[in-house]
Amino acid sequence: MEKRWGWLAAIVLLLLMALLPLWFHSARTRSVEAPSTALHPAPKSPPKTPAPSKRNSQNETLTLAELRHMNRRGTLPRLVYLPDADRGEIFRSLRRQGLPLWISDRFFLLPGRIKPGWVRLKRPISLREFFEKINDFPREKTRRVVMYSGDSLDDFVRNFSRQTRLNPRAIFDEYFRFSPYLEGGILAGFYRLPYRLSAGPAMAYLTGQSEKVFARLARKYLGEYDPAGFKRYLIVASIVQRESWHPEEMPRIAAVIYNRLKRGMKLQMDATLNYGPYSHRIVTPERIRRDSSRFNTYRYKGLPPEPLGSVTRDALVAALHPAKSSDLYFVRNLSGTHDFAPDYATHLANISRIKAERARLERAKKAWNALRKRSAKPRHR
């Protein structure tokens, strides 16, 4: 009997928790939208009110408050993205895009099934009409947009503006409105965006999709997602991304970074100097001597202050889950991958071996070119 009463009390508590947001929604709507007769003259023609229902007076008051809130016009963005997700994710996405939703709308307005895609509103409509016709609106045709791995935000904005004809300044402004990161806030990969687009919905979508991946990986490997703390891993991932294009060796490169940081060693990596306007420039010895920014890991200890550019999911996983190794050095070999070493002596031996292989390859190329020239000469009879 006690167990039965416990279950009953739990059910009643859950019902009260579900109805509390609706009550707050109604009270807040009445307090905000109730017109003052001293400041607002009466309209020439009285507004239309819904026909009285057979509900009790309390339920009828809540319904009228909901209708006043839902009938507000001009507050919905013209372009809305509906993700292929559950009700909670759809609700969070719509609020991020600027729809004036309350917590209670998640339970009382969102329909059970929503067709995903981009919706363009051709005229200002109310929230009620939007949700009533949410599956009837035609979905926009989309095209593929690419965020290349290693690209800086400047690179992406330049290419994106060329594709969409959008103002670069508007793209920058909207990016920083939605993303907490100065660089790397858009994950490298392919995205689908409408042909007709504005900067706000585009950046809300791109940064939102990226942060979903960031949050999922952070909760898997760190237990929680905190953008302030997650930036450290985004910086490491951006270095890994610059150093290698091979996913299989990315965890070992991440291990080298963490091992050097743990020992208080300078990272001394050329990739950290590929920041901002130097993202695709070759790092020369002169540049290493001349650059005085915190991105110069030959001069300063620790990580750079910001990510270097966009990263792939593989590089991010490597930063969150590095390989277990004692490596402190690596050098690029002739195949394009890297040879790793736990100490400086082994590292020097790897460098000498690679130099010898490169010299032997150059000699073989010269001999082959000389042979081709001799065979190409015409023979005199």
Image (cartoon, helix red, strand yellow):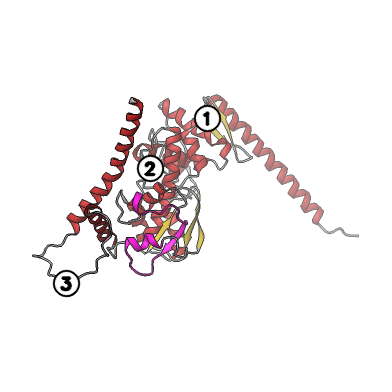
Q: Secondary structure at mark 1?
A: loop
Mark 1 / mark 3, whichever is N-terminal: 3
Residue farthest along the right direction in this orientation: 381
Q: Secondary structure at mark 2?
A: loop
Tag 2 and tag 3, C-beta contact below 8 Å: no
Q: Which residue is mark 2?
A: 306
Q: Which residue is mark 3?
A: 43
Q: CA distance from mark 1 to mark 3?
A: 71 Å
Q: Secondary structure at mark 3?
A: loop
Q: Residue at x 39, y 43 (%)?
A: 291
State whether residue 10 is above or below residue 284.
Answer: above
Which stretch did the figure color magenta?
106-133
Q: Is residue 145 magenta?
A: no
Q: Please give left or right for residue 99 compared with residue 138 in the image.
A: left
Q: Which residue is mark 1?
A: 323
User: Horizontal and vertical percent for residue 199?
Assistant: 38, 60
Q: Is residue 128 magenta?
A: yes
Mark 1 / mark 2, whichever is N-terminal: 2
Tag 1 and tag 3, C-beta contact below 8 Å: no
Q: Residue at x 50, y 42 (%)?
A: 313
Residue farthest along the bottom direction in this orientation: 44
Mark 2 / mark 3, whichever is N-terminal: 3
Q: Which of 306 and 346 lies nearest the eye of the viewer?
A: 306
Residue 176 visible to an observer of this rendering = no
